[in-house]
Amino acid sequence: MRIVSLAKGAFTLAIAGGAAFFVLTMPATLPKDAMAGVRPADAKGGETLFDAGGCASCHATPGQEDKRKLGGGLAMHTPFGTFKVPNISPDSKVGIGSWTEQQFADAMTKGVGRGGEHLYPSFPYTSYQRMSLADVRDLFAFIKTLQPVPTAAPPHELKFPFSIRRGLGLWKLLYLDGRPFTPDPKVSDEVNRGAYLVTGPGHCGECHTPRNPVGGPDTSRRLAGGPDPEGKGWVPNITPHADGLAKWSAKDIAYFLETGFNPDYDAAGGSMADVVLNTAKLSAEDRAAMAAYLKSVAAIAGKSPARKKAE
């Protein structure tokens, strides 16, 4: 009888645990009336957000000249497996041409796909959640003006258990707080604008903030640099610390975002070169705002990259 009771208890716990997992990992979307009352879309404003976010850097099909053909296919190699960037062109079959505005907003701010599935955080919705719904609407309107690309992107190639999307619900409980950007009344409008661009559409922290073993950002070292998420070197510290941007003026940072040249006349390389191609399209005022904000953040020491032992 004791064995039977233990078996029943274990079965009950398993059922309860499964039910709890099901509830905790359920994808959450915006309220159905979330877009009601949001101002009409401005596709021109959406173009600014498109450039600030560097959408073309990831979603343009690799090797093509027209960076606004968003057929996807870029392979992002990580410790969790290889993520394949999706087609977000206005194609109605393999892109987002048949998505509703609400579905796009759910993807951007909640990390939930059209079919109600969790999206992987290789798509930086942890930053995009800071965007206003008005700006999300503008971005969607701009993307809809681009040329449809009828080529489907290949599926992700992920290791177990990361291939199980449902588990992302637990990850989101830790790293997706659902809070849009709130201006700081103690700083200037310029710094607030820069803060919005850097933390929201620009998603600078996605690369410049180190991550823990489960891919979550180490917020105690925000913007202090660390290993490249794809394992391709070291992402620099962009706080105003001595091993970051302490010696750079705000004008130096703004100039770098326009030209890719730093105060030592070295040029941006790697993925940062692609970022500069996008930030160069922003207005001078927006680049200056981003620079002003980066000079205002807390100075945090960055860890030095690991050195290879001499042969």
Image: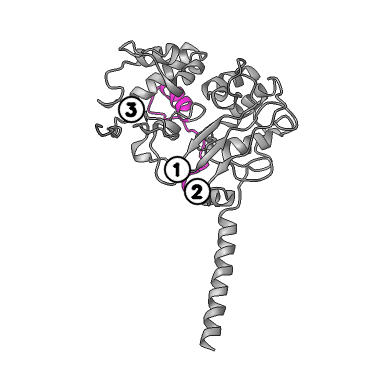
Who comes first in sequence, dot 2 or dot 1? 2
Question: Depth-wise, is mark 3 or mark 2 nearer the camera?
Answer: 2
Q: Residue furthest front?
A: 311
Which amino acid is tagged 3? Thr
Which amino acid is tagged 2? Trp
Who comes first in sequence, dot 3 or dot 2? 2
User: Around disc 1, counting alpha carbons within 10 Å, would you say few (fewer than 14), some (14 to 19), or many (20 or more)?
Assistant: some
* Distance between mark 2 and mark 1 Cα atoms: 9 Å
Q: Is residue 22 above or below residue 268?
A: below
Name the spot of residue 180 as percent of width and height, x first: 52, 36
In this orientation, does residue 70 appear?
Answer: yes
The secondary structure type at the circle numbered 2 is: helix
Which mark identifies residue 215? 1
Report the span colored magenta: 172-199
Q: Image quarter for residue 228? A: top left
Residue 190 inside the magenta-drawn segment: yes
* Distance between mark 3 and mark 1 Cα atoms: 21 Å
User: Around disc 2, counting alpha carbons within 10 Å, would you say few (fewer than 14), some (14 to 19), or many (20 or more)?
Assistant: some
In this orientation, does residue 41 appear?
Answer: no
Who comes first in sequence, dot 3 or dot 1? 1
**Pointers 2 and 1 in contact (CB under 8 A)?**
yes
* Distance between mark 3 and mark 2 Cα atoms: 27 Å
**Pointers 3 and 1 in contact (CB under 8 A)?**
no
- The residue to which callout 2 is attached is 171
Name the spot of residue 135 as percent of width and height, x first: 59, 27
- The residue to which callout 3 is attached is 239
Question: Depth-wise, is mark 2 or mark 1 nearer the camera?
Answer: 1
Which quarter of the rendering shows the C terminus?
top left
Q: 155 and 177: which one is in front?
A: 155
